[in-house]
Image: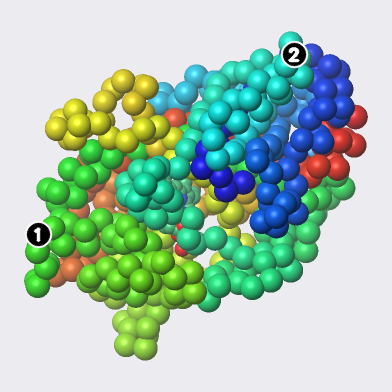
Amino acid sequence: MRKKHETFVFFTINDSPKFKTTLKTSVVSQITSAAQLLQPSGQSFVAVNVAFSQSGLSKLGVTDDLKDATFTGGQSADATNLGDPGTVNWVGAFKDRKSMHGVLLVASDTQKSIDAQMQSLRTAFGSSMSILYTLPGRIRSGRYAGHEHFGFLDGIGQPAISGWDISPRRGQQVVTPGIILAGEPGDTVRGRPLWTKDGSFLAFRQLKQLVPEFEAFIDVKAPAVDGLTAHESKDLFAARMVGRWKSGTPVDLAPLRDNPAIGADSNRNNDFTFLHGDNALTFNSDQSRCPFHAHIRKTRPRADLPSPLNAIMRCGIPYGGEVTSGETRAKTSSPDIRLERGLAFVAYQSNLANGFQFLQKAWANNPNFITNKTVAPGFDPIIGANHGGQRFISGWDLKNTSSTTTLQSDFVVSRGGEYFFSPSISALRDVIAA
Ligand code: N7H
């Protein structure tokens, strides 16, 4: 649902029979289909989807086992596992897993049409549901459109689904449909109820970004690089933490200076594996182009570890406003919750333990991943989490790539979330609303 705005409306169900009747008679027909979204001519002005947590399915009397223990347990039970310091930083609504029954996703190019759509959904559902929490996301404006709050172009590395994406871009990872959609070829889980076919697990996370703190760290810590100005050295340091320049160009293809033409070309911006003719023999120690800790290398290791089972479909959107002049001056994010900014992170997969949960826990939070390297890479500096404690990275200083440095605090703070199941339209109509 690639629109300029997307609002996530988390709700609790008060009256299951009435909720089901409304879902069946007036909401299912408004759910936007994948076919609609795939055809530019079929684009609806407002796109709508709905997904349910385990508590929500239970509340609706859907007692089938979806064979995903991570989903069944809920995200609050997973907080420590994901590297959060428990749920201390979590938004209240995400802590109350018994009441967190589902999420409505409403996207459009104007907030006004989202508000109108939400008003009509609220009227239809009446007292059968109550809204627990609303998070309005929107893409940044002007030259930052498509860039997340740290300034990097987002939405580049996305798997192509075989049979659906008929012309994958060069270097794009092609996965079988079952990696993302339940019950399709390639889904490794057996014995799920038939109605889950073509549904997907949605991992939602509200990830607060401490932008002034991130920038201050770059400012203070960026090592001087021979031949580069201080400004260029700082840009390079930040780019190496992500694995891409702010333009989207991979540092693996432009290791010292940005070449924005690569980032802008969808047939070039994914066409790399970290492996080159000249580093085949030194592959496990070579961090001259891209450090092992880089966010995109940790979350998709390419030639380090080809692993199509761990692909996710990312569909998040930034939330919150731009950094204020006061925050820039103070080099600190405001404690005023109304000024909070970050990423409304959304990832779809057919198996949470292979997808989002695995990427976060086994890769980003694991200082020894990527394994077999001559030095431990350290944490993913963007999303790697150590329960709020210190983290380290190696490969940060080009002059001595085995030296490590400490990151005293997180630049991304989890405000919690929930795991949902997003059913197919027929399952919504014939099972969830039945
Ligand atoms: Fe990440 N960032 O600004 O640094 N991410 N991410 N992410 N991320 C990517 O390729 C970012 C998060 C992945 O195929 C880019 O689209 C931020 C979580 C994966 O090469 C940028 C946050 C998880 C990829 C960012 C955040 C992932 C990816 C490059 C949180 C999973 C594709 C643009 C606030 C647990 C890798 C692009 C590939 C790319 C950023 C969250 C995973 C710029 C700020 C929680 C799989």
Of labels 2 and 1, the one closer to you: 2
In this rendering, position of residue 274 left or right of residue 310: left
- Residue 371 visible in the picture: no
Residue 126 — which label? Answer: 2
The residue at the point 9 percent across, 71 percent down is 226
In this rendering, position of residue 229 left or right of residue 370: left
Residues packed near mark 2 inside 10 Å, few (<14), some (14 to 19) or many (20 plus): some
Whether the residues at callouts 2 and 1 have beta carbons within 8 Å, the answer is no
Q: What residue type is labelled 1?
A: Ala
Q: What residue type is labelled 2?
A: Gly
Element type where label 1 sits in the image: helix
Q: Position of residue 237 (x, y in %)?
A: 22, 59
The residue nearer to you, when weighing 8 against 82, is 8
Disc 1 under 8 Å from ligand 1? The reply is no
Q: Which residue lies furthest to the bottom in this view?
A: 277
Element type where label 2 sits in the image: helix
- The quadrant of the image that shows the C terminus is top right
Mark 2 or mark 1: whose residue is earlier in sequence: 2
Cα gap from disc 2 to disc 1, whole angstroms? 59 Å
Q: Where is residue 69 in the image (x, y as percent from the top left)?
A: 67, 41
Disc 2 under 8 Å from ligand 1? The reply is no
Q: Where is residue 326 in the image (x, y as percent from the top left)?
A: 19, 28
Q: Which of the 4 image quarters holds residue 59?
A: top right
Q: Is residue 55 above or below residue 31?
A: above
Q: Where is residue 103 in the image (x, y as percent from the top left)?
A: 64, 30
Residues packed near mark 1 inside 10 Å, few (<14), some (14 to 19) or many (20 plus): some
Q: Which of the 4 image quarters holds residue 272?
A: bottom left
Residue 230 — which label? Answer: 1
